[in-house]
Image (spheres, rainbow, N blue to C red):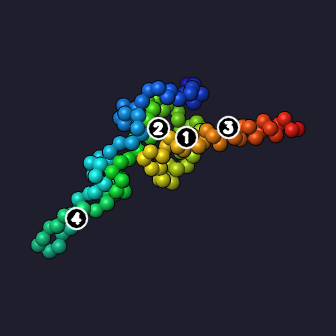
Amino acid sequence: MAADAQDSPLDLNSSCVECAGSGVTPCDLCGGTGKWRALTRKRARDNYEFVECPQCFGRGTRVCGRCFGTGLLNVRGLLRRPEASLLVQQMQKGEVKPGEVKQLLAKAVEQMKANAAAKLAAGAAV
């Protein structure tokens, strides 16, 4: 069953319900402002300061949790596919930025095609 999901191509015509196909959602902690209201207590006074949001790091947006930033509706088995290797590496490092996922997937597909062409050329030369 997992092999079926892995072998099936991504359906590029259907978009994610959560982010409407953009791959980006507003931060739920700061409401998309990028600023977070923090309370500082000094003796008898309570002050509020606006600081950088700790969840989105001041961007105001986050990578969509439902589609992993691809903007696609069905991403079943996406992280197991070979073209998602760059995406998985960036996710492990915590360096995936909103809007970057589609570029990472396209870059990985180009690398796979280049590797396949190199292998084909090396096989023909032998």
Question: Which residue type carries mark 4?
Answer: Glu
Q: Which mark is residue 55?
A: none
Question: Which residue type carries mark 1?
Answer: Leu
Q: Quadrant of residue 73?
A: top left
Mark 2 Cα shell of 10 Å, populated few (<14), some (14-19), many (≥20)? many
Q: Are marks 1 and 3 in contact (CB under 8 Å)?
A: no
Give the residue at x 28% y 62%: 51
Q: Provide the residue designation for mark 4.
A: 49
Which of the two labelled residues, at mark 2 and mark 3, occupies the earlier sequence position? 2
Residue 30 position within the rendered picture, expressed as x and y whole percent measured from the top left = 27, 51
Residue 10 position within the rendered picture, expressed as x and y whole percent measured from the top left = 53, 29
Instruction: Judge whether 97 appears above or below 18 on screen.
Output: below
Element under disc 4: strand
Mark 4 Cα shell of 10 Å, populated few (<14), some (14-19), many (≥20)? few
Please state the total of marks drawn on the protein image. 4
Element under disc 3: helix
Real-space CA distance between mark 4 and mark 3, rounded to the nearest whole angstrom = 51 Å
Q: Provide the residue designation for mark 3.
A: 113
Q: Provide the residue designation for mark 1.
A: 105
Q: Provide the residue designation for mark 2.
A: 70
- The foreground one among 46 and 71 is 71
Which of the two labelled residues, at mark 1 and mark 4, occupies the earlier sequence position? 4
Residue 99 position within the rendered picture, expressed as x and y whole percent measured from the top left = 44, 45
Q: Is residue 45 left or right of residue 116?
A: left
Q: Are marks 2 and 1 in contact (CB under 8 Å)?
A: yes
Which of the two labelled residues, at mark 2 and mark 4, occupies the earlier sequence position? 4
Question: Which residue type carries mark 3?
Answer: Lys
